[in-house]
Amino acid sequence: MDQNLKCRDNPVVLVLESPEFKNIFTQEVLDLKQLFDKYNYEIRIAGGAVRDLLMGQPAKDLDFATTATPDQMKDMFSKENVRMINMSGEKHGTITPRINDKENFEVTTLRIDLVTDGRHAEVEFTKDWKLDANRRDLTINSMFLGFDGSVYDYFYGYDDLKNHRVAFVGDADVRIKEDYLRIMRYFRFYGRIAEMPNNHEQETLNIIRNNVAGLQNVSGERIWMELKKILQGNFAGDLIKTMLNVGIGQFIGIPNPNITELERLLKRSKHLDLHPMSYLAALLNDIDDVTLLNARLKFSGYDRDMTYFIVEHREDKEASRPMLPYEKLILNTKIKQKDAVEYVQEVLKYRGDENLLEQLKNWEIPIFPVKGKTLKDNGVPPGKMYGRIIEKLKNIWIDNEYKQTCDDLVKLIPSVIDECKTK
């Protein structure tokens, strides 16, 4: 621990009594506490839940810290017949008991990081709460909460939270070099905490700029997990610009960002609750850029295909009526129709076409009346022609705004077959 690091003599800054705090005490939480009391181990709530409760928000996930070692916890839970799951966290000090066979809680032994390589750490267990707080990334994430409501804040995280300030615990350069993913976490929590889009401390940005190359050794999955949350949070457009400005782009798969297109997107559409993939699509110049970014960040199939779809269909489309090309995309889709509708909606948001977006939301998708059986019943021999005939009939039906019945379309089958044969 940095001995010169400013910290409180008395870490208890206040006692919480809010309804949000009282709501965390399910029977399972109380039973967990009772177990640790029985074996004389101290346990407190840690990290994000403390921050959320201090902001007057419900605690999303409860994580716990304790003076008990992993072996002591395993021994205790075994004696009390409490099932433990997900043992992969044990080497970092985390044991996950399933309380009352109903709820899982991650409980982590207080620790210090002995050796770090920018991704992983070798840890040593401790009973010193301040030492554990000191190894955490940001001051706002370094607080603990006692079951009596006492908030333990060693490094002025509560003050930073009140001032909407995102700051590393101690030396930002040291904290980042311990785990380069903390660069992404800084921007994620800036979007959660800050009141203004560009109120960063210049010294922090300079330190981040000097360390961005460390991200090249962090897995794409970890980077994407943080980046997606950044793009779902406040100031997404401004934050991505700041991140690119400090040089993050080339290390996360965006070596040649299209800032001009991003600016256009933000100007016309940032009020439309854009999907994270819209922000990324704006930065990509073409389909090949999507492939490169996906290779780095490992998107889900849904997110990957949405990005391809946006890049492919974001330009103007010529048509007799504005909605027609988008209706065709949905009705002729080879993917799930529900996904196609969502992708088209995102393209319209991306383009800032609010009128068409509203029309699409109110559009009742018509059902094409002709099936393969219809062709068979009307004397068309089975074969490869079926698909082409149905496609042509469907496009005729779409162009005529879905007015033709099955009988109307059946009358067109001979001419469509002739057309298919000549081609």
Image (cartoon, rainbow, N blue to C red):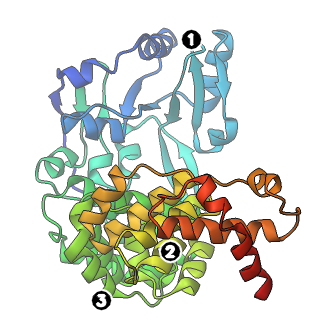
Alpha-carbon span between mark 3 and mark 2: 25 Å
Label 2 with label 1: CB-CB less than 8 Å: no
- Tags 3 and 2 touching, CB below 8 Å: no
Q: Which residue is mark 1?
A: 100
In what element is the residue under mark 2? helix
Label for residue 229? Answer: none
In screen coordinates, is 50 left or right of 320? left
Can residue 31 be seen in the rendering of this structure? Answer: yes
Label 1 environment density (alpha carbons within 10 Å; few <14, some 14–19, many ≥20): some
Left or right position of 393 against 12: right
Q: Is residue 238 visible?
A: no
Q: Which residue is mark 2?
A: 215
Q: Which residue is mark 3?
A: 260
Q: Does dot 1 land on a helix, a strand or a loop?
A: loop
| Mark 3, secondary structure of its residue | helix
**Where 195 sits versus 287, above or below?**
above
What residue is rendered at 76% in x and 80% in y? Answer: 418
- Tag 1: amino acid: Asn
- Mark 3 residue crowding within 10 angstroms, few (<14) / some (14–19) / many (20+): few
| Amino acid at dot 2 | Leu
Q: Nearer the viewer, residue 208 or 197?
A: 197
Mark 2 and mark 1: Cα distance apart in space: 41 Å
Query: Number of callouts in the render?
Result: 3
Point out the tag, 3 or 2, that comes first from the N-terminus. 2
